[in-house]
Amino acid sequence: MTQQLTFIGGGNIALAIYGGLLDSGYPPQSITVSDPSPEQGALATAMGLTWQADNASAIKTADIVLVCVKPNWVETVCQELQPALNGQTLVSVAAGVTTAQIEQWSGTDRVIRCMPNTPALVKTGMMGLFSNPSVGPNTCAAVENLLSSVGLTTWFNQESDLDAVTAISGSGPAYFFYLMEAMITAAESFGINEAVARTLVVQTALGAANMAAGSEHSPNVLRQQVTSPGGTTEAACSLLTQAEFTALVTAACAAAKARSEALSTH
């Protein structure tokens, strides 16, 4: 039986998920989007979905409610939903908002947290999931199946692990963009124009990611395979090693994790 879905908030993450579902054949009549923005409503209705501006009304027929709003709006949204909740499962994509907080604000313990990342917009996302014990295995499987339309999913037994997920995959795309920025700047300093530099760097990053995803070898082994003794790659990697590149990246990830932990206890 097809699950009836309601998205609270119709922004980028919601669009990525319901767009992926539609592309995979999910029936549009089974999806409702609740968002006060007429622009988001027009987009949803153009795709054959039901649009409502009232959150409580939008969840009346839902089996699963996906809360896709900014973290500072989750409390207000949950309080609006509380009178209308009747056994639905809440799936929150808000960083730093715990299941305990959602339970308190919504009055239900049927809560799943999802930590997505922006590559979900191009169906290559990575999502960490945590479920309260009150959510049954069938519902967990249904949510995993839904989210798989925009990338890969992994379940965690401890909710605190989502802080690490936030630091690695949630914030991770920005780290790669930062490295790409630096490489583009380097290429431009060598006299290559910006457009060509961008193509060189982006295609190289894409190729390296595809190789890592499709290989049985670790990134460490792949790096060694393309590093000839005394060659150009060794010259570059030696400099990064001297600059304690791994320690710097680890410290950056630790800072992101600490910030996620701080938000979770706010």
Image (cartoon, rainbow, N blue to C red):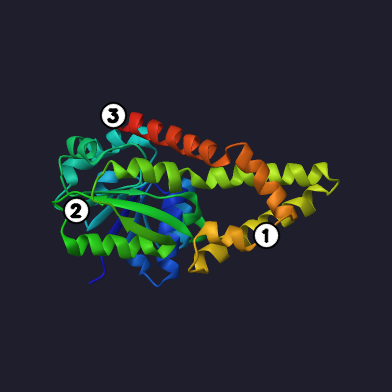
Classify 10 Å Cα crowding around label 2: few (below 14), some (14-19), many (20 and above): many
Residue at 45% x, 32% y: name it.
Answer: 255
Please, what is the three-letter code of the amino acid marked with disc 2? Answer: Gln
State how far apart marks 1 and 3 are (Cα). 40 Å
Instruction: Tell me if label 2 and label 3 are in contact, CB under 8 Å.
Output: no
Give the residue pinned by disc 3. 265
Can you say which quadrant of the picture contains the N terminus? bottom left
Residue at 23% x, 35% y: name it.
Answer: 101
Badge count = 3
Residue at 42% x, 67% y: name it.
Answer: 22
Q: Secondary structure at mark 1?
A: helix
Q: Is residue 149 left or right of residue 173?
A: left
Q: Is residue 94 left or right of residue 19?
A: left
What is the residue that sits farthest to the right in this orientation? 191
What is the residue that sits farthest to the top in this orientation? 266
The percent position of residue 251, horizontal first and vertical second, equals 48, 34
Residue 37 shows in this picture: no
Please determine whether, in this image, residue 36 is positioned above or below residue 255: below
Mark in front: 2 vs 3: 3
Please, what is the three-letter code of the amino acid marked with disc 3? Answer: Thr
Give the residue pinned by disc 1. 203
Classify 10 Å Cα crowding around label 1: few (below 14), some (14-19), many (20 and above): few
Mark in front: 1 vs 2: 1
Q: Is residue 116 left or right of residue 178?
A: left
The percent position of residue 82, horizontal first and vertical second, equals 19, 41
State how far apart marks 2 and 3 are (Cα). 26 Å
Please, what is the three-letter code of the amino acid marked with disc 1? Answer: Gln
On residue 231, the disc is: none
Classify 10 Å Cα crowding around label 3: few (below 14), some (14-19), many (20 and above): few
- In depth, the one of 110 and 156 nearer the eye is 156
Give the residue pinned by disc 2. 88
Compare marks 1 and 3 and give the one earlier in the sequence. Answer: 1
